[in-house]
Amino acid sequence: MEDQRLSFADRAQVMGGDVLRYYTQLSDYLLTYKKVKLRLSNRCASYRINGDLICKIAIGGKTLKICLAVDPSRDDVAAKRLHFRDLSSSPSYAEVPAMIPIKSDLCVKKVTEVIDIMMKDRGISKSK
C-alpha cells in the first residue's frame, strides 16, 4: 500500500495532547479577530486578512510551529523573549518569516501577546 501523508488536521488529531491543545488555543485566538479567515491544507493552517497571509501553523516532528508576519527585532516583540527563527529565505514563508516553536503554555501566552501587537499594527480589532 502507498505511504500517504496525513493532512494537517489529521496530524493534529494524531498528535493529540499538548500539541492539539496548543493548536486549538492559538487558532481560536486568531479567529477572535475581525476579518481573519482560516484555510486548512495538507501542510498547515493558514490565516489571512483580506488576502494577506498573517500566520501559518504547522507541525514539524512532534512540535507545533507558528509563523507570524511580524518583525522579531522590534522592541515590543523582542521583550516577549521568544525564540524566533528566521524563515525569510524560504519562498513559502516569505510573508510570515518569524517562526516560533510552541512547547509550553507560557509560550502560547507570549505568542498571543505578539499576535495582539501584530493585529494592532494592522488596525484589526477583535470581534465582539
Image (cartoon, rainbow, N blue to C red):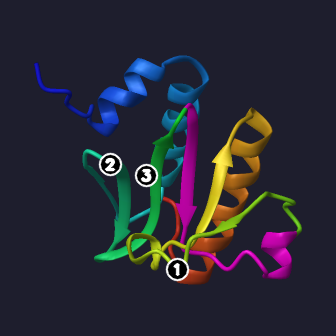
> Is residue 72 inside the magenta stretch?
yes
Residue drawn at x 35%, y 67% as measured from the top left = 48
Describe residue 100's horizontal placement relative to residue 122 as left or right: right
Which of the pair 94/3 is nearer the observer? 3
- Viewer can see residue 127: no
* Helix, strand or loop status at disc 1: loop
- Are the residues flagged by discs 3 and 1 in contact, CB closer than 8 Å? no
Query: Could you say which quadrant of the image residue 78 lies in?
Result: bottom right
Q: Is residue 57 magenta?
A: no
**Magenta residue span:** 62-78
Q: Amino acid at mark 3?
A: Leu
Residue at the disc numbered 3: 31
Disc 2 marks which residue? Answer: 43
Disc 2 + disc 1, Cβ < 8 Å: no
Query: Vertical placement of 81 versus 44: above or below?
Result: below
Q: Position of residue 44 (x, y in %)?
A: 36, 49
Residue type for callout 2: Arg
Q: Which residue is mark 1?
A: 89
> Which comes sooner in the sequence, label 2 or label 1?
2
| Image-quadrant location for residue 93 | bottom left
Is the residue under label 2 in contact with that under label 3 (CB below 8 Å)? no
Of tags 2 and 1, the one toward the viewer is 1
SS at badge 3: loop
Q: Is residue 123 above or below residue 78?
A: below
* Residue 80 image-quadrant placement: bottom right
Report whether 75 appears left or right of 55.
right
> What type is the residue that disc 1 sits on?
Ser
Q: CA distance from mark 2 to mark 1?
A: 18 Å
